[in-house]
Amino acid sequence: MFFTLLFTGSFLRVQDNGGGIYTWTGNDLHLIGRGSKILDNIILNGIGAGSGTSNPSELPSHGIYMDDNTGSVEVRGNTVAFCNGNGLLLQNSHEIDLKDNTIFSNGTQLLINKRGNYKLKGNTIYKNKLFSKERGQMVLKALSDIDDIRQFGNFDNNYYCRPIDDRFIINTISNDATSSIYTMCTLDDWKSIYNFDFNSKSTPIKIPPYNKVTITGKNKFSNSTFSKNINDVSTWSASNNCDIKWNSDEKLDGGSLMVSFNNKNASIKDRRAIITMEIGGVSVTKKYILKFSLLGTKNNRNFQVFLRKHDVPYNDISPRYYCNISKVRTEQEFAFSFPATENKAFLVFDVSQDDSTFFVDNLQLHEADFALTNPDDYIRFEYNASNSNKIVNLNNNIYIDIENSIYQGNITLKPWTSIILLKSLNINPLDKASVPSGNLIKKIMKLNWHSNSNASYFDTDSSINNGIVKREVFSLKEYTTEEDAKDDYQIPQMSPNLSKISSPTNLPDGYKNNWLSSFPNPANKVISITLPNEVSDKSLSTRILISTGQVLEQKIVQTYANRLFMLDISKYPSGLYIIELNTNLYSYKAKIIKQ
């Protein structure tokens, strides 16, 4: 079997449970597809035919489907996008060589499913780009009717991307002798639990799911602070193994809600419980913001948060979001847009006994106004289903791909290839920074700033204690320090994708800017820095600092003609460095990035 250079515009409009490219050998162990290749195909728009079925919303239309007992197939260089089912589906298949595929915006990007007496093992999943465009799309699902996910194969050097909420992107379900084990994983969880994907990466840019939040209504949960009791909170579990109590020992801010399990016996088949909170009515015409403080007794645990009908049939009336639990206090926030209208509703936490004990405080659910993020404003997908090069005009935008390469102007797509691009958010720096920089030796100043920009937050880097860098993060757009500072400060603006844009220098008369530029930057071999006109020194005392402020190297260097200073950085590891140049009269700095 050999598929190559195939383009499918849409498929599975009148039937279900199939693929754009599908293989199956069933129980015949001799017909396992040995030596088959599926190379460089573009498969788009798996529709599915849910109408008239018992579950019309289930649309099992998959891009490339390796079904029962398929084995020894090379699947390389393919593009699969916009399938309502899975982009890639390995079901009871073995020795599948899955490499260099681009899988974009399918219901789930990759599903690996073992069930029955078939073997699912020996597969190689390497250098694939698995990209979920929508928040509700999973990146990877690994399912088994026994406890053998670790034997599925070798995974490494893949990209697991979901820019809008890149936390719980992997779903695993396995079964031991007594019950199912259901886990939602971050990429780091997946690596540590299964020892897969040691060199794999997640999305290079994070996109906020919503912005421009304005609270418009009162708190719909009356017992927000749990200062005296846990009124309006209830719990239910099939195994009757969940306890909720009022905790008074100031785990958070005074009293709090404590959730724990009184029986963690692994033989209990149904390990889950729900915690319900009375919130009154909700409307399909409204939006809501949920906030609460959370503290756990274990790391890397999670539970689901959602809205539910108060009475039978107790159905969900909003999407479910996963909330991370850790031993460090966190402030959680979730947005619910246009739930079903109900006169009485619950806010629900769906928890597992594996989540251990946790504490909740300051719970607030407000009507709010906010703008939902449109992924198309940030994410661009292009493909070339032809035998000729394709020129794509990026329309004066700057993009990066998921490997962090930069693109602008025009790009050329080779035949039968595709690319996923993320817009580099262009947010202007601060209009004005009131913090002077330069040679502030023995000068005392007050740190203050004000900004009308739409930055997410600001942080400051200050040099203290002979070069050790201290960072303080401020969520305010306006701030004044309580104590005088005696060191250099710079205020970088944090954009919504968490990239940093430093404030411009605003120097009072008499100060000199001591931050110099270098070229090239980033660099991997030699950088050059041109010193200001006032520098006449033939040699300079130089310190190279790593980003934490620790001194990596200190030496005397010579300047060249035209006050040109050159530094060989080829021996340094990749990262951010600060170069300090000290003359008899002045001190200068430059930031460089070693690639």
Image (cartoon, helix red, strand yellow):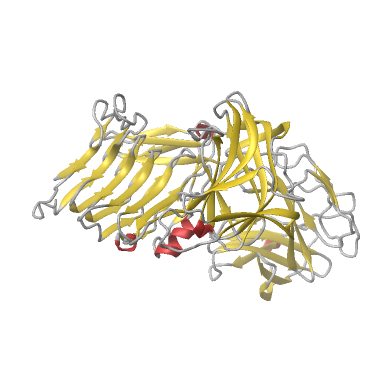
From the top left corner, tell me how far across and down residue 80 is, in percent: 32, 39
Residue 147 occupies quadrant: bottom left
Question: Does residue 32 appear to the left or right of 296 in the view shown?
Answer: left
Residue 311 occupies quadrant: top right
Residue under the image location 14 percent in, 53 percent down = 35
- Considering every residue shown, the one lying at the far front of the view is 240
Residues 469 and 256: in front is: 256
Residue 211 occupies quadrant: top right
Q: For the N terminus, which image quadrant?
A: top left
Question: Does residue 1 appear to the left or right of 145 in the view shown?
Answer: left
287 is higher (above) or lower (below) than 271 = above
Question: Does residue 548 appear to the left or right of 372 in the view shown?
Answer: right
From the top left corner, tell me how far across and down residue 370 is, in percent: 65, 31
Residues 408 and 303: in front is: 303
207 is higher (above) or lower (below) than 155 = above
From the top left corner, tell me how far across and down residue 260 is, in percent: 58, 58
Residues 45 and 425: in front is: 45
Residues 489 and 358: in front is: 358
Residue under the image location 31 percent in, 24 percent down = 51
Q: Count every numbered label the image shows and give the total.
A: 0
Residue under the image location 31 percent in, 28 percent down = 50
Is residue 493 among the parts visible in the rendering?
yes
312 is higher (above) or lower (below) than 508 = above
From the top left corner, tell me how far across and down residue 453 is, in percent: 73, 37
Is residue 372 among the parts visible in the rendering?
no
